[in-house]
Amino acid sequence: MQQIKDYLDQIASISTSDWDFFTSKLQPRVIKKKAIFLQLNAIENHISFIESGVVRLFIPKENPDKEITFGFSFKNQFISAYDSFLTQTPSAYQLQALTETSLLSITYADLQDVYNNTQIGNLIGRLTAERLFLLKSKREQNLLNLSAEERYLKLFKERPELLKVIPLKYISSYIGVTAQALSRIRKRV
């Protein structure tokens, strides 16, 4: 619980009563390595804070080699199929734990309860949504403005631990190249 408190304290000062109400709604979950914990077309009912682990966001394909990885989330970040969570409609993608992952999760209904019954809930919700949007926007800009090699270098400058935990096939998909092209990039750098 301390990790999420430290994260939220960076956003705003939270009263003890608001904190107690919020934490009463959090559910700890442990997801096994490689487990898919949100299936395609399922409605996302949780937004979760990652206490430890790595999560992949991807669009599944019949041929697993054609899957499209479009995001990763790490320790001290929120994870959700956020568009599905907000609209309560089926998700167009899946969430998979790449390592054993510990989460603190809150359901859609409980989050609405936090919004309605705390002074700080709406502010935290808005600021968290803004951070998720900025991450998405940054990814889109990188895809449009940087070469594959620049995206690869930037990814590992920002997250050097990725090489240890994420298979190269997911990294190549994430930066928008084939596994062979990634191999050539890695030989050059």
Image: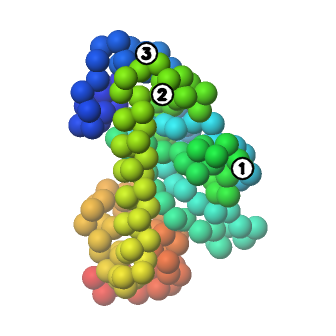
First in sequence: mark 1 or mark 3?
A: 3
Which of discs 1 and 2 lies nearer the camera? The answer is 2
- Identify the disc placed on residue 90: 1
In the figure, 48 relative to 168: above or below?
above
First in sequence: mark 1 or mark 2?
A: 1
How far apart marks 1 and 3 lie (CA) works out to 29 Å
Residue at (52, 65) in percent of width and height:
70
How far apart marks 1 and 2 lie (CA) works out to 23 Å
**Figure label count:** 3
In the figure, 100 relative to 184: above or below?
above
Q: Position of residue 106 (x, y in %)?
A: 53, 29
Residue 38, visible in the rendered structure: no
Q: Position of residue 21 (x, y in %)?
A: 43, 15
What's the residue type where badge 2 is placed?
Answer: Tyr
In the figure, 16 relative to 55: above or below?
above
- Horizontal side of 133 relative to 31 (left or right) equals left
What's the residue type where badge 3 is placed?
Answer: Phe
In the figure, 48 relative to 185: above or below?
above
Residue at (59, 68) in percent of width and height:
68
Q: Which residue is mark 3?
A: 21
Q: Which residue is mark 2?
A: 115
First in sequence: mark 3 or mark 2?
A: 3
Q: Position of residue 20 (x, y in %)?
A: 38, 14
- Label 1: state its secondary structure: loop
